[in-house]
Amino acid sequence: MKITNISNEQIYALEQAIRSAVQERIDTDPDVADCYLCINPDNWLVQVMYIEESNLTAPNRDVALLNLMYDLKDSYGGNEIWMLNDEAIYDLAASYKEMIEIDFCMN
């Protein structure tokens, strides 16, 4: 078992990368209902994927973009005004503060 702790500076950098990826998706394609955020802790790659891509890579680990934003108009169906949910983004980044890696040996 290996426990890895990352610094507050790294958490801040991860938070900014998440913000940037989500905001870019909002700016380029506001239809975010079927998009997921994937964070690869091996190389700290942060990317937005459609649900089909997400299910191929790491289902159950990726985060729905809708969980990281809110609609100012509270109207689903094409008239949304998406804004970043600062608290949700911070909480997601902070969840990587301590990572536990366990190797299983199958006998």
Image (cartoon, rainbow, N blue to C red):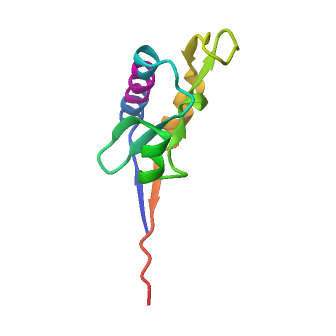
User: Can residue 97 be spotted in the picture?
Assistant: no
Q: Nearer the viewer, residue 83 or 81?
A: 81
Split into 4 quadrants, where in the image is the N terminus? bottom left
On screen, residue 64 above or below 16: below
Q: Where is residue 68 shown, x and y percent of the image?
A: 56, 28
Q: Nearer the viewer, residue 49 or 99?
A: 49
Q: Which residue is drawn at the image coordinates 39% and 22% (left, top)?
A: 20
Q: Quick check: can you spot residue 14?
A: yes
Image quadrant where residue 18 sits: top left
Where residue 59 sits: x, y (%)? Answer: 51, 52
Magenta segment, principal secondary structure?
Answer: helix
> 62 or 88: nearer the eye?
62
Query: Quick one: 81 or 95, which is closer to the camera?
Result: 81
In the rendered view, does 92 fall on the left or right side of 1?
A: right
Which residue shows up at 62% across the image and 19% down it?
A: 70
Q: Quadrant of the C terminus?
A: bottom left
The magenta region covers 16-24
58 magenta-colored: no
The quadrant holding residue 23 is top left
The residue positioned 70% from the left and 14% from the top of the image is: 74
